[in-house]
Image (spheres, rainbow, N blue to C red):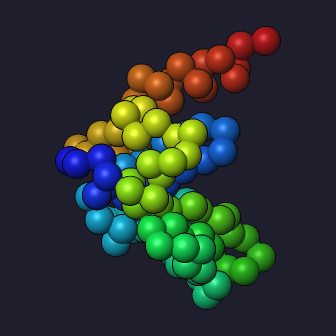
Amino acid sequence: MRRLTAWYILDEDDGIVRRESTRKALVKWACSKYDGRVLPGTKRIRAGHYLYAIGADRDDYRQVSVFRGEALTHTAYDLEQEPLYPYASDPWELGPRGSETRETESTP
């Protein structure tokens, strides 16, 4: 998958959460991951950057930042970073980077 044409979910703390070849596939993954649907209020921030409200309803939702790779070229994000959830065959399984992050958080 070409990094600049791929779509990404980003988190300020965790970096790249998921990468997909289309925005539609990425949003579908996010809806499944966060047990919700796209709610009214999704915003296009600028070309290649969207902010989705995903959840059960307006009282129980999370904001998900979705970017196209080319919109990230002049940012601190590393498009080569492995996503937290990298596997196409098991889309909700944490990859090695995600597992390391979770182990560090649980260590006293």
Question: Toward the viewer: 25 or 71?
Answer: 71
Vertical position of residue 85 compared to residue 72: above or below: above
Number of callouts: 0
Locate residue 7: give its quadrant.
bottom left
Q: Residue furthest bottom?
A: 40
Considering depth in this image, is 14 or 60 the residue closer to the camera? 14
Inspect this view and state whether residue 5 appears. Answer: yes
Q: Is residue 83 above or below residue 39?
A: above
**Outermost residue, top side:** 108
Q: Is residue 24 above or below residue 66?
A: below
Which quarter of the figure is the C terminus placed in?
top right
Return the residue nearer the eye: 30 or 43: 43
Nearer-the-camera pick, 104 or 76 = 76
The residue positioned 57% from the left and 39% from the top of the image is 76
Residue 53 lies left or right of residue 69; in this view the side is right
* Horizontal and vertical percent position of residue 65: 57, 61
Q: Quadrant of residue 64?
A: bottom right
Left-right relation of 85 to 62: left
Q: Position of residue 44 (x, y in %)?
A: 55, 78
- What is the x, y in percent for residue 46? 54, 73
| Residue sitting at the far front | 74
Residue 94 visible, this angle:
no
Q: Which residue is at a point 60% across and 18% down the rendered structure image?
A: 103
Q: Where does residue 58 sit, x and y in percent of width and height?
A: 72, 80
Q: Residue at x 60, y 47 (%)?
A: 11
